[in-house]
Image (spheres, grey):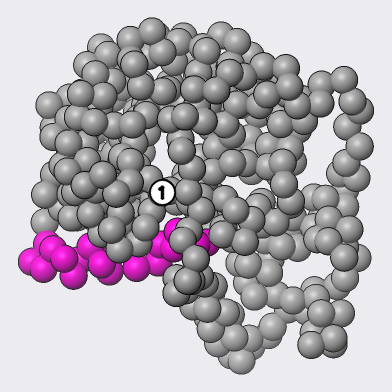
């Protein structure tokens, strides 16, 4: 019986006390190492070719799950992927913070990236990109090299969007948008480190305090060798307030020759279509909208591929199945029926 067919009928047997906490920790360690010794290569995607395919009626654009700290974590990604085909095409990890300095750089990089597994969603055939954050070109290059050559990441993404003061205070995240020259050196270092083994991409906001350096930042990323950029068109100062300025995504499409992924305020099917129509973006990345509605990727894809057919999902059962899968991945909870049958 499929996950969606099971719905939420089985009860959850929650572990209790010290034994339960130890079991949860053991489960999480096992989950964290899942697939790292696979004999099969991890899922990959020809991003640029896929993004160059036409979108419209009958053809859905590439759908990507946004990296979101404390939201789109491993349990969330796995639970969302477990909802079957027709969901997101690709996901990317929350950022891995690369320090500004390290006494033993190689050891530091190995430790920071140790929990990343390109095989995390291999069972569902979904690639998982690796996002890193930092401002030291040398250490970013080491991280990109390790992720590309050892961890076999399908892409390595540079975070230039995190608005948290604890991050920007150390020169990383969206603070890179204040210095296009440093942004370019960081991306170039990552491209050199990856050495053609995988692609390097950049996710950025529209600016720090304002959008005065927006075009310079975009050109810096492109000239450094980024294969595509993802734009969340809000400034650091805005954080998540106000409306995303989609006109800036459209401007980026006009300015750049590399693909541009649109992100921001895609909370329903109508907004996904509107983003594509207004910006001509190369792909759609969904963040908080997928947290609010775990069926959103399926709704968007269905609206493109089967626009004339009725939506026939059993939504309560599907959402309950998602929540159950999330509990299993996050806490090691298993259904009493599954426990008795094992």
Position of residue 177 measured from the top left corner of the image (x, y, whole percent): 24, 27
Q: Is residue 310 visible?
A: yes
Write the residue at 68% across / 69% down: 328
Whether residue 244 sits left or right of residue 179 in the image: it is right
Considering only vertical position in the picture, is 290 above or below 148? above
Q: Residue furthest left?
A: 103
- Split into 4 quadrants, where in the image is the N terminus? bottom right
Which residues lie in the magenta part? 102-120
Snapshot quadrant of residue 220: top left
Q: Is residue 163 visible?
A: no
Snapshot quadrant of residue 79: bottom right
Residue 9 belongs to the span the image colors magenta: no
Q: Residue furthest bottom?
A: 19
Task: Name the residue that disc number 1 marks.
Answer: 154
Considering only vertical position in the picture, is 130 above or below 14? above
Q: Nearer the viewer, residue 184 or 209?
A: 184
Q: Nearer the viewer, residue 18 or 106?
A: 106
Write the residue at 52% across / 61% down: 120
- Split into 4 quadrants, where in the image is the C terminus? bottom right
Judged from the image, the secondary structure of the residue bearing numbered disc 1 is loop
Position of residue 168 measured from the top left corner of the image (x, y, whole percent): 25, 39
Write the residue at 63% across / 86% down: 20
Position of residue 333 measured from the top left corner of the image (x, y, whole percent): 70, 75
Considering only vertical position in the picture, is 259 above or below 13? above
Q: Nearer the viewer, residue 281 or 244?
A: 281
Position of residue 39 measured from the top left corner of the image (x, y, whole percent): 47, 71
Classify 10 Å Cα crowding around label 1: few (below 14), some (14-19), many (20 and above).
many
């Amino acid at each position: 019986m499929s996950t969606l067919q099971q719905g939420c009928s089985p009860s959850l047997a929650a572990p209790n006390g010290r034994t339960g906490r130890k079991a949860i920790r053991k489960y999480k360690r096992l989950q964290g190492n899942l697939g790292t010794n696979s004999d099969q290569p991890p899922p990959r995607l020809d991003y640029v070719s896929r993004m160059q395919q036409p979108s419209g009626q009958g053809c859905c654009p590439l759908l990507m799950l946004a990296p979101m700290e404390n939201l789109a974590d491993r349990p969330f990604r796995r639970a969302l992927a477990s909802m079957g085909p027709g969901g997101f095409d690709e996901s990317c990890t929350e950022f891995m913070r690369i320090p500004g300095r390290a006494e033993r750089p190689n050891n530091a990089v190995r430790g920071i990236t140790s929990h990343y597994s390109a095989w995390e969603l291999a069972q569902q055939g979904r690639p998982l990109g690796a996002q890193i954050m930092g401002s030291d070109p040398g250490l970013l290059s080491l991280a990109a090299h390790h992720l590309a050559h050892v961890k076999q990441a399908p892409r390595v993404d540079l975070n230039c969007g995190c608005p948290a003061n604890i991050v920007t205070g150390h020169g990383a995240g969206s603070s890179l948008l204040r210095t296009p020259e440093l942004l370019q050196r960081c991306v170039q270092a990552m491209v050199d480190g990856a050495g053609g083994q995988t692609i390097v991409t950049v996710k950025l906001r529209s600016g720090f305090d304002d959008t005065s350096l927006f075009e310079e930042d975009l050109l810096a990323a492109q000239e450094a060798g980024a294969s595509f950029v993802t734009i969340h068109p809000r400034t650091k100062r805005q954080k998540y307030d106000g409306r995303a300025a989609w006109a800036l995504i459209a401007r980026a499409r006009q300015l750049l020759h590399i693909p541009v992924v649109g992100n921001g305020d895609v909370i329903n099917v109508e907004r996904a279509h509107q983003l594509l129509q207004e910006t001509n973006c190369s792909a759609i990345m969904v963040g908080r909208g997928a947290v609010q509605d775990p069926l959103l990727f399926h709704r968007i894809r269905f609206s493109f591929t089967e626009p004339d057919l009725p939506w026939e999902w059993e939504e309560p059962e599907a959402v309950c199945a998602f929540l159950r899968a999330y509990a299993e991945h996050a806490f090691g909870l298993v259904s009493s029926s599954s426990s008795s049958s094992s």
